[in-house]
Image (tube, helix red, strand yellow):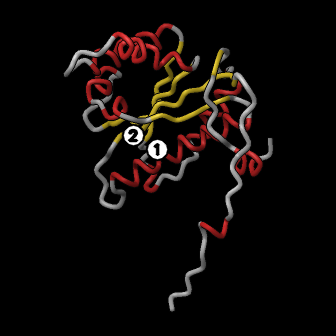
Amino acid sequence: MDALEALHNRVSIGGLTEPAPDGQQREAIFRAALRAADHGNLRPWRFLVVEGDARARMGELYLKASETGEPLSETQRERTLAMPLRAPMVIVAITRLQDHPKVPFDEQRMSTAGAVQAMLTAAFAQGVGAYWRTGALAENRAVARGLGLADNEEISGFIYMGTPQKPPRAAPELAVEDFFANWTGE
């Protein structure tokens, strides 16, 4: 797929099944992440790839981190355990926050977001289904610790990847002029 075609048509694809991206697809997806805009060349991102039985262990980590207050219902417990099983591969995007006089933490987070977006587009270009999830578990420090993150690291999201169960929906048609305007300084 042409680069502009991928950029113009990429959509999130849920409903993922086996197989996960193969070795060649992964290489292309992972290399795309490394081209994200990165002020100061801090490379504030790193990624964990979770597959196979590790996904079930990740579900157990989610459950343990979620059971700190009111007990969860059986339905909530089952749902939490099943979250990492939504796709054959889950990539945990991590931002490593570094003190720097010219690169604030928000810019480091944006660099990780750029890396994730590049991976999503590279996956789409190869016919790999992918979507990015955040939420309470991404912000949960018990989950972060369970995944081995350092105190200066945070989860920027979980990227689910696999084979689409059905063709992707068409990208919505948006009018460029609704989002871009000239500024003349007058």
Res. 96 mark: none
User: Image quadrant of residue 61?
Assistant: top left
Vertical placement of residue 49 versus 93, above or below: above
The residue under the point 28% across, 16% down is: 72
- Identify the residue shown where x is 46% and y is 19%: 83
Does residue 182 appear left or right of residue 100 in this picture? right
Where is residue 183? Give x, y as percent: 55, 82
Q: Position of residue 134 (x, y in %)?
A: 43, 35
Q: Residues within 10 Å of mark 2 (few under 14, many from 20)?
A: many
Q: Residue lying at the far bottom in this picture: please name it.
A: 186
Left or right of residue 182, residue 77 in this image: left
Q: Which residue is mark 1?
A: 112
Q: Secondary structure at mark 2?
A: strand
Residue that lies at the very extreme toward the left in this rendered image: 69
Q: Residues within 10 Å of mark 1 (few under 14, many from 20)?
A: many
Q: Are marks 1 and 2 in contact (CB under 8 Å)?
A: yes
Outermost residue, right direction?
1
Residue type indicated by callout 2: Thr
Identify the image quadrant of the N terminus: top right
The location of residue 74, given as percent across then percent down, is 35, 10
- Amino acid type at circle 1 is Thr
What residue is disc 2 on? 95
Q: Which residue: 72% across, 46% down? A: 9
